[in-house]
Every structure is written in structure tokens, then in C-alpha cells.
Image (spheres, grey):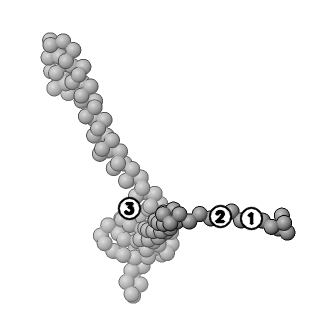
């Protein structure tokens, strides 16, 4: 803060230089906000929504790399089942890193949308147009 006061004092002596310095500092802060702080908050919000939307039967991966299926959901923790012997573990909800079930569903939806777009694009390239159906006198 003392640097700002010194710059302001120097700016007054040179005339109006302090305003440009303050504007530059505000611009740097704005750039930092939009490049670093805002995306991080968005990521945190998405992670929290993912943890709140966990359902019984979802396959998850914890921060430690443990893969399991959700068996019980409580306020602050969940119980997962891992391995062939179905070992149950109680973990904190915040330790969930990825919901594989939702991620796989999202991948399938994206792939289906891409495939539909490819088919639509291929239809345009070939120039195929659906001709309108002409109704006969009996169908009218």
C-alpha cells in the first residue's frame, strides 16, 4: 500500500501520472480475476454440484485413487463398495474426485451428438433433399 502512496505522490509532482498508474493496476487486477480467480471458482462450484448429485449405484474415483460403487449416502460421508470381495469403506464426501457413471453418460451423449452432426453434414454434402409428398385425391 505504501508503494501506491509513493506512486501517487510522484504522480502529483509530475502531473496526472498517478491516474494512469491506478488505471493500469486496476486493469491488471481485472485480467487476473478473469484469467485465474473466476475459472477456479467455476471449477469448485462444478465439483460441489457433482458431489451433491451422487446417487446410490454410481461408480466413483476418490482423490486417493480408490474406485468404488456408492452404497450409502449420508450428510457428510458416503459408504462405497470396492473390489471383488465387496469391501465397504466410509469416506468423506469431499474425497470424491470423479463420478465415472455420470462421466460415461456425458461421453455417450457427446458422441451421439457428434454422430448426428456428421450424418446431417453428410446429407448436405450429397445434396439429398427430401421431396415433399404429393397427396393423391384419396388421401386429401
For the residue carrying disc 3, how many other residues have a C-alpha within 10 Å: few (<14), some (14-19), or many (20+)?
A: some
Q: Secondary structure at mark 3?
A: helix
What numbered label is drawn on residue 94?
Answer: 3
Mark 1–mark 2 distance (CA, rounded to whole Å): 9 Å
Residue at x 38% of width, y 61% of height: 94
Q: Secondary structure at mark 2?
A: loop
For the residue carrying disc 1, how many other residues have a C-alpha within 10 Å: few (<14), some (14-19), or many (20+)?
A: few
Q: Is residue 137 left or right of residue 34?
A: right
Q: Is residue 102 visible?
A: no
- Residue 47, image x, y percentages: 40, 58
Residue at x 31% of width, y 35% of height: 30
Image quadrant where one finds the N terminus: top left
In the image, residue 65 above or below residue 51: below
- Residue 121, image x, y percentages: 48, 63
Mark 3–mark 1 distance (CA, rounded to whole Å): 62 Å
Q: Give the mark nearest the N terminus, 3 or 2.
A: 3
Callout 1 touching callout 2 (CB < 8 Å): no
For the residue carrying disc 2, how many other residues have a C-alpha within 10 Å: few (<14), some (14-19), or many (20+)?
A: few
Q: Nearer the viewer, residue 119 or 67?
A: 119
What numbered label is drawn on residue 131?
Answer: 2
Image quadrant where one finds the C terminus: bottom right
Location of residue 130 (image quadrant): bottom right
Q: Nearer the viewer, residue 50 or 88?
A: 50
Q: Which residue is mark 1?
A: 134
Residue at x 36% of width, y 75% of height: 67
- Residue 40, image x, y percentages: 33, 50
Q: Is residue 96 left or right of residue 105?
A: left
Mark 3–mark 2 distance (CA, rounded to whole Å): 57 Å
Q: Secondary structure at mark 1?
A: loop
Q: Is residue 49 visible?
A: yes
Amino acid at each position: 500500500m505504501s508503494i501506491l502512496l509513493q506512486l501517487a505522490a510522484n504522480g502529483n509532482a509530475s502531473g496526472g501520472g498517478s491516474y494512469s498508474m491506478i488505471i493500469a493496476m486496476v486493469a491488471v487486477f481485472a485480467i487476473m480475476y478473469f484469467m485465474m480467480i473466476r475459472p477456479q471458482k467455476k471449477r469448485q462450484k462444478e465439483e460441489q454440484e457433482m458431489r451433491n448429485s451422487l446417487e446410490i449405484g454410481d461408480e466413483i474415483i476418490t482423490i486417493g485413487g480408490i474406485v468404488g460403487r456408492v452404497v450409502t449416502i449420508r450428510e457428510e460421508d458416503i459408504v462405497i463398495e470396492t473390489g471383488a470381495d465387496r469391501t465397504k469403506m466410509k469416506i468423506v464426501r469431499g474425497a470424491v474426485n470423479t463420478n465415472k457413471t455420470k462421466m460415461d453418460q456425458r461421453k455417450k451423449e457427446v458422441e451421439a451428438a457428434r454422430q448426428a452432426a456428421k450424418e446431417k453434414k453428410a446429407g448436405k454434402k450429397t445434396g439429398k433433399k427430401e421431396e415433399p409428398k404429393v397427396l393423391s385425391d384419396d388421401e386429401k
